[in-house]
Image (cartoon, helix red, strand yellow):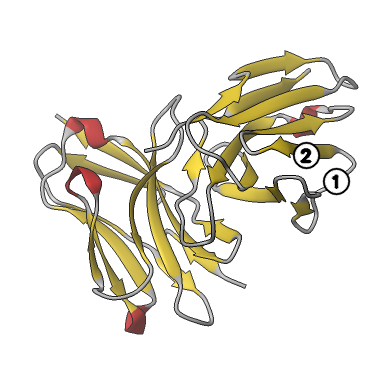
Amino acid sequence: AQSVTQPDIHITVSEGASLELRCNYSYGATPYLFWYVQSPGQGLQLLLKYFSGDTLVQGIKGFEAEFKRSQSSFNLRKPSVHWSDAAEYFCAVGANNDMRFGAGTRLTVKP
Amino acid sequence: GAVVSQHPSRVICKSGTSVKIECRSLDFQATTMFWYRQFPKQSLMLMATSNEGSKATYEQGVEKDKFLINHASLTLSTLTVTSAHPEDSSFYICSARAGGIYNEQFFGPGTRLTVL
C-alpha cells in the first residue's frame, strides 16, 4: 500500500526567502503525486501534480516540485515566499481511487 | 477550478443524535465523491468512495452503518453520522471528481462536527 511521509511538521521562513517542503513516498509502481495547500476555512487546493514525463513540475502560485525516483521524493519548492503562502501543505500519492495524504507541513512566514 | 461546497460548515450536536453533511459539486457532474476525516494537526484519512447510483466503498476500519453515505445524484453526496458520540468529533472533508483517475479531485471546505 502507498504511504507518504512529510518529515517537517512546521517550518518558519522569512518573507522573500526560498522554501523547500519535503515529501517522501512509498509505492510499488510509478506513483501519481500531488501537492495541495489548505488555508483556514477553505478547501484543499491543488498546487501541482505529477503523473509522468518531465520530472520537474510547475504549479500555480510560483511553486514547483521535482520527482526523484531514486530518492522516492517529491519535494515542493518556491524561490521567494510571500506572506500569503502561510498555510498547511499536504503531499499526496494516489493510484486508482485511493489517495493517501501525508501528515502535512504547516508553513509560517515571518515578516 | 471547479467548486465543491459543504453544508453545514459547523455543527454541534448531542451524543446519540444523527447529523447529515451535504457535499455538492456546483459547476460540474461528479461521477465519484470521496469522504475524508481530518483529526487536529493530522492528515486526511479516506473514509469512503462513492460513485453515483452505487453503494459506497468503505475503507478498512470505517463502520458503514455508522457513517452512511448516499450519492444519489451527480452533484450531491451526503454523509450521515448516526448515533454520534464525542469521539466522532472531527473535521469532515469531501471531494468530487468528474471522470476517471487522471482527473483532479476538487475539495470542499470541510465541516467541523462537535458532539457533546
> Does residue A76 appear to the left or right of B109 in the view shown?
left
State the residue at coordinates (80%, 31%): B81
* Mark 1 element type: loop
Q: Where's residue B92, x and y in %?
A: 63, 34
Q: Secondary structure at mark 2?
A: strand
Q: In front: B11, or A47? A: A47
Q: CA distance from mark 1 to mark 2?
A: 8 Å
Seen in the picture, residue A111 relative to A79 is either above or below; the reply is: above
Instruction: Read off the residue under disc 2.
Output: B69
Instruction: Identify the amino acid type marked 2.
Output: Ile
Where does the image place residue A69, in percent across and percent down from the top left?
A: 35, 81
Give the side of residue A91 with respect to residue A29, left or right.
left
Label 1 with label 2: CB-CB less than 8 Å: yes
Give residue B86's quadrant in the image.
top right
Quadrant showing the C terminus of chain A: top left
Name the residue carrying label 1. Answer: B64
Q: Considering only order in the chain, which callout, 2 or 1, is on the residue closer to the N terminus? A: 1
